[in-house]
């Protein structure tokens, strides 16, 4: 027998174990955009989880059935996520900003007929109910007169606080599917087993030194791996407290850190930059943070300014949805070798390869590859996409990240950027191909190319180069408006440039490198 730190644990069993040990401890503090705070102990929250699970059982939701969660940060997301795990169903979070076309793709890809949503997104599903072949539509809060809509709060009140049926769940079974945009037009569904989720939780606890009773404050969106694996899962594994912020506010975030005595938090560069823009306050260094878990690049002067001003250390790290957790992180102590993103953590190996898959020596730039165990330390693959899975994980269990970097002589990893055609904006991955498809769907646009351009706050902004049909009277604002109704807000181009023609390769592909080199946005 070969064992690891997870063993046979599942999200179901880990939650139940934590509740039994730490039931009276505070599990969740929720901070709304109005600064209203709701608190729940593990025991109090578990009663809601079990009631919601009973609602789902009554609705006939089956083990391993896919259920979409179209919610923003709110307690109901965690209630539903944990309740679905109790009955062995699979959570499929949907980005809160997604519009009908983006939602339709995920539902059809997963043959999903059951959706849990909130009032601000409800119309997407009521207006397209038949088209989407929906069977069950659940509203987490608020009210609807539509007879097709189940009111979760009302139905939970009719259910007992103990689970009506015990469902056996295996660590190897799928717990969550996270759809993540890459270099393709449509997002790919990263499969997370129960073992993946718990592995990420236990691993991250060890990585940052989290213990029972610690407080982790996060404003990361609940549909992201950053929330699930960097915040919720480790908190549950440790019996710690999660402070969930409804939406990030640069003006209020550091006050929330101080007021709620957070020991840990996680940020991206856009957050660090916008916090530095706020007026200096006399209480800023009066906090309980041990360190800040950090990803995405800052300039050296920005990092130093942040650490000096707020008197806290940033732990630079590297990971992706497909690696479950950060595979590298700078140490909690000693030299961090900035701007390195750290050395490979225990259970991971990292190598750099060239275009032919040959391992490169120290100092050579190439694709970052990570060795792990599918279904445990890395995902087992993509949902219903064997070809993409084969490209992601080779036969020796090396995961090909699509990211560019190098290792120094001592094994420190330095991240340089994406190999593929993708934009990273405020932590969101944006497929250039997806935005280009929307642009070229306009009858007056003959062709289009999308690139990422530098942005001092968000790392990158979206810029579209557009070739119009002859004599078309289309303006940049009209193009942006067209995109706004078809794309999530973070994917909409901020800049539009008109071209008479594109530089192309011999096979007709647009030479984006030439566009980037000549760009003066």
Image: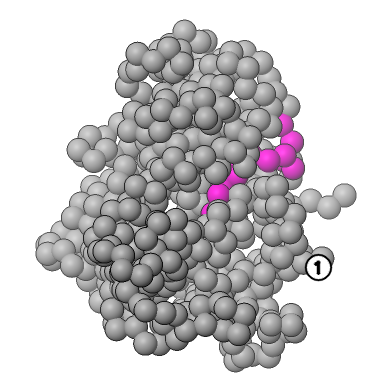
Which of the 4 image quarters holds residue 319?
bottom right
- Residue found at the far top of this picture: 158
The stretch in magenta equals 169-180
Give how far across and how far down residue 412 sits, in percent.
57, 81
Whether residue 277 appears in this view of the structure is yes
* Pointer 1 residue: 396
Quick check: 378 left or right of 465? right
Element at label 1: loop
Residue sitting nearer the eye, 155 or 162: 155
Residue sitting nearer the eye, 389 or 140: 389
Q: In this view, does 392 lie above or below 376?
A: below
What is the tally of numbered marks visible in this picture?
1
Q: Is residue 475 above or below residue 142?
A: below
Give how far across and how far down residue 410 sits, in percent.
61, 87
Q: Does the magenta stretch include residue 478?
A: no
Q: In this view, does 236 lie above or below 248?
A: above
- Residue occupying the point 57% across, 78% down: 508
Whether residue 26 appears in this view of the structure is no
- Residue occupying the point 40% across, 57% down: 443
Which of the 4 image quarters holds residue 344?
bottom right
Task: Give the crowd class for mark 1: few <14, some 14-19, many >=20 residues within 10 Å.
Answer: few
Residue sitting nearer the eye, 390 or 212: 390
């Amino acid at each position: 027998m070969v064992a690891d730190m997870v063993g046979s644990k599942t999200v179901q069993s880990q939650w139940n174990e934590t509740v039994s040990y730490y039931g009276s401890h505070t599990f969740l503090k929720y901070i709304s955009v109005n600064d209203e705070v709701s608190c729940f102990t593990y025991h109090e929250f578990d009663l809601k989880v079990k009631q919601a699970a009973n609602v789902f059982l009554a609705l006939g939701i089956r083990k391993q059935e896919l259920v979409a969660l179209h919610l923003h940060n709110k307690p109901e997301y965690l209630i539903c996520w944990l309740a679905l795990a109790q009955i062995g169903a699979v959570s499929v979070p949907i980005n809160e900003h997604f519009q009908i076309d983006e939602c339709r793709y995920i539902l059809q890809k997963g043959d999903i007929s059951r959706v849990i949503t909130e009032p601000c997104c409800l119309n997407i599903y009521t207006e397209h109910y038949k088209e989407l072949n929906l069977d069950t539509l659940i509203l987490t809060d608020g009210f609807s007169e539509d007879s097709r809509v189940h009111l979760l709060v009302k139905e939970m009140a009719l259910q007992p606080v103990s689970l009506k049926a015990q469902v056996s769940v295996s660590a190897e079974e799928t717990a969550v599917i996270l759809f993540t945009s890459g270099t393709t037009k449509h997002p790919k569904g990263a499969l997370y087993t129960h073992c993946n989720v718990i592995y990420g939780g236990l691993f991250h606890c060890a990585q940052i030194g989290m213990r029972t009773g610690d407080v982790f404050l996060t404003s990361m969106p609940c549909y992201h791996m950053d929330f699930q694996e960097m915040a919720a899962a480790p908190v549950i594994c440790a019996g710690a407290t999660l402070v969930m912020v409804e939406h990030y506010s640069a003006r209020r975030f550091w006050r929330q850190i101080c007021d709620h005595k957070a020991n840990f938090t996680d940020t991206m560069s856009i957050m660090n930059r916008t916090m530095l823009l706020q007026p200096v306050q006399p209480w800023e260094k009066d906090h309980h943070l041990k360190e800040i878990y950090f990803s995405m690049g800052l300039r050296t002067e920005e990092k130093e300014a942040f650490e000096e001003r707020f008197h806290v250390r940033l732990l630079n790290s590297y990971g992706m949805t497909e690696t479950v957790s950060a595979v590298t992180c700078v140490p909690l102590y000693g030299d961090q070798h900035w701007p390195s993103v750290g050395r490979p953590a225990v259970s991971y190996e990292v190598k750099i390869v060239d275009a032919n898959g040959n391992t490169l020596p120290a100092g050579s730039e190439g694709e970052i590859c990570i060795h792990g165990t599918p279904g445990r330390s890395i995902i087992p693959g993509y949902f219903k996409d064997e070809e993409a899975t084969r490209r992601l994980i080779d036969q020796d269990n090396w995961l090909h990240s699509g990211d560019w970097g190098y290792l120094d002589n001592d094994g420190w990893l330095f991240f340089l950027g994406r190999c593929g055609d993708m934009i990273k904006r405020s932590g969101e991955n944006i497929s250039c191909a997806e935005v280009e498809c929307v642009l070229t769907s306009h009858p007056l646009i003959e062709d289009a190319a999308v690139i990422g351009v530098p942005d001092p706050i968000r790392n990158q902004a979206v810029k579209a180069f557009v070739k119009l049909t002859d004599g078309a009277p289309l303006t940049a604002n009209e193009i942006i408006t067209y995109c706004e109704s078809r794309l999530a807000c973070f994917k909409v181009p901020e800049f539009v440039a008109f071209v008479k023609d594109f530089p192309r390769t011999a096979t007709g592909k647009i030479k984006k490198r030439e566009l980037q080199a000549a760009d003066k946005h």
